[in-house]
Image: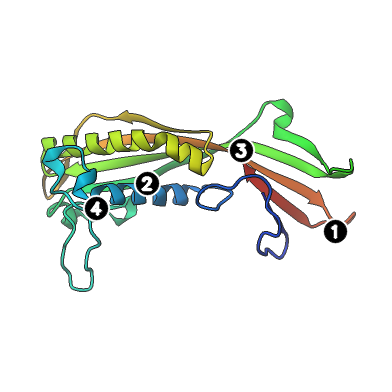
Amino acid sequence: MAILPEPTWGEPTKSYGEQSALCITRPAPHVVTGLILQLLRAHFSDPDNIVDPKLKGFIWTDDDTTGHTINSKVKIEPSYKFDAATVEQRPSILVRRGEFISNEFALTNGSAAYMSDNGNYEGKVKQVKLTGQHSIEVCGHSAMEADRLSEEVFFRMLEYKSVIEQDLKFSHFEVKVLKGLQKIEEGNEHWKASIDIRWAFIYSWRVVALAPILKKVGQIFNIE
């Protein structure tokens, strides 16, 4: 946990509890997007990581955008970087953020008094369960290409599940479903398969009245 007093927001001055492997106290959706991207890029960067022998030629590398050349054999990007022209040249794996939802606990609305070690009242602690959704969209030139690539991604993310939960302190990280193939029209005929992911964590913060009339607000947040 870190305390950040308003209205001036400084660096955390005290740490409570265990932080995630990324040294963060709240894995916001854009962080999870980056995590999924990095895991998939690492997987496809080495043919020894790829299980399906038919896919060992689909190696991801950083494209040389300055020279307008395409080195990577598969495009792995956030969905907002989708380029229809790129799909014509190579398959794509796109990570799309879905809903991010706050759910209050039924018991006392997730609110409780915070007491110091000597028994003094030091504000009120609030907790909510935050749930997020992501989808991984795999686009290929043929139904077979999209099917085999999406299966490779599905099983890899499934195998990462327990490590992600442990290192990022999620209450759960679920690789829910590999959806059926869909035909898409982007220039020539292409196919797409999507993988749905759900994740959640407990977000905590403490509200402290620092003055009796004109109050400042302090926040302490943590993941359990």
Q: Amino acid at mark 4?
A: Ser
Mark 1 or mark 3, which is nearer to you?
3
Q: CA distance from mark 2 to mark 1?
A: 44 Å
What amino acid type should be assigned to the residue bearing mark 1?
A: Leu
Amino acid identity at mark 2: Ile
Quick check: can you spot residue 132? no
**Residue at image coords 83%, 56%:** 215
Name which of mark 1 and mark 4 comes first in the sequence: 4
**C-alpha separation, residue under disc 4 versus residue under disc 2:** 14 Å
Gap in angstroms between the C-alphas marked 3 and 2 = 21 Å
Q: Residue furthest bottom?
A: 66
State the residue at coordinates (74%, 41%).
125
Q: Residues within 10 Å of mark 4 (few under 14, many from 20)?
A: many
Of mark 1 and mark 3, the one earlier in the sequence is: 1
**Residue 143, percent from left and from top:** 12, 36
Does the residue at mark 1 contact the one at mark 3 (Cβ under 8 Å)?
no
* Up-down relation of residue 32 to residue 103 (above or below): below
Q: Nearer the viewer, residue 99 or 178?
A: 178
Alpha carbon distance from label 1 to label 4: 55 Å
Badge 3: residue crowd in 10 Å (few <14, some 14–19, many ≥20): some
Left/right placement of residue 133 relative to residue 129 reads left
Residue 202 point in image, percent of width and height: 60, 37
* Residue of label 2: 36
Q: Are marks 3 and 2 in contact (CB under 8 Å)?
A: no
Marking on residue 224: 3
Placement of 189 over or under 104, stated as above or below:
below
Relative depth, front residue between 22 and 93: 22
Q: Earlier in the sequence, mark 2 or mark 1?
A: 2
Q: Callout 4: helix, strand or loop?
A: loop
- Regarding mark 2 in the picture, which secondary structure is present there? helix
Q: Secondary structure at mark 3?
A: loop
Q: What residue is disc 4 on?
A: 45
